[in-house]
Image (spheres, grey):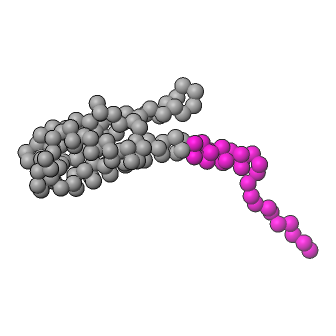
Amino acid sequence: MKTRRKQGGITLLGFIIVAGVVGFFLFIGFKLFPMYSEYYSVKSALKSLAAEPGVGNYPPARIQDLFFRRLNISYSAHVKKEHVKIQRVDNGWQMDVKYEVREPLVANLDAVGRFEATQMLTGTGADPN
């Protein structure tokens, strides 16, 4: 006597629904990845600037120039000079970067990312000038 085995699996409709949900999340990920990648480039530029010898003695214009040179290497497009604030703190500088990125998603829906990064610039060493 032969018994019928019950087949298991996903139906075509179930596969289309799963593919649609996965596709939606991939689409959102592809839209959000560049803004987070840029944020990590900003953090990396701040850390490498803090490691520069004598940065605590640099004038703010030179600090800002060095920061934007580091950002240009990583093709960062959303951070502008008005987003960067440098203020004197004790024996160095505090650099704050606050900016917003708005990416269109679908029709009139946008993804908005607000990013903030702060770094103390107290590198000691010889005066560069």
Mark yes or no: residue 13 visible: yes
**Image quadrant of residue 17?**
top right
Which region shows up in magenta?
Answer: 1-27
Q: Position of residue 40 (x, y in %)?
A: 37, 49
Residue at the bottom extreme?
1
Give the number of marks: 0
Q: Position of residue 74 (x, y in %)?
A: 40, 47
Residue shown at the point (34%, 39%) measured from the top left: 115
Q: Is residue 20 left or right of residue 36?
A: right
Q: Is residue 122 left or right of residue 42?
A: left
Quarter of the image for the N terminus: give it: bottom right
Toward the viewer: 66 or 77? 66
Q: Is residue 8 above or below residue 129?
A: below
Residue shown at the point (39%, 48%) measured from the top left: 73
Q: Is residue 126 left or right of residue 101?
A: left
Q: Is residue 6 above or below residue 61?
A: below
Residue at the right extreme?
1
Q: Is residue 43 above or below residue 81?
A: below
Toward the viewer: 67 or 114? 67
Taking the magenta stretch, the answer to whether it contains residue 90 is no
Residue shown at the point (71%, 45%) measured from the top left: 16
Q: Position of residue 119 (x, y in %)?
A: 22, 47
Residue shown at the point (26%, 36%) measured from the top left: 84
Mark yes or no: residue 42 visible: no
Residue at the front extreme?
129
**Image quadrant of residue 2?**
bottom right
Toward the viewer: 24 or 76? 76
Q: Is residue 46 left or right of residue 36?
A: left
Residue at the left extreme?
90
Taking the magenta stretch, the answer to whether it contains residue 5 is yes
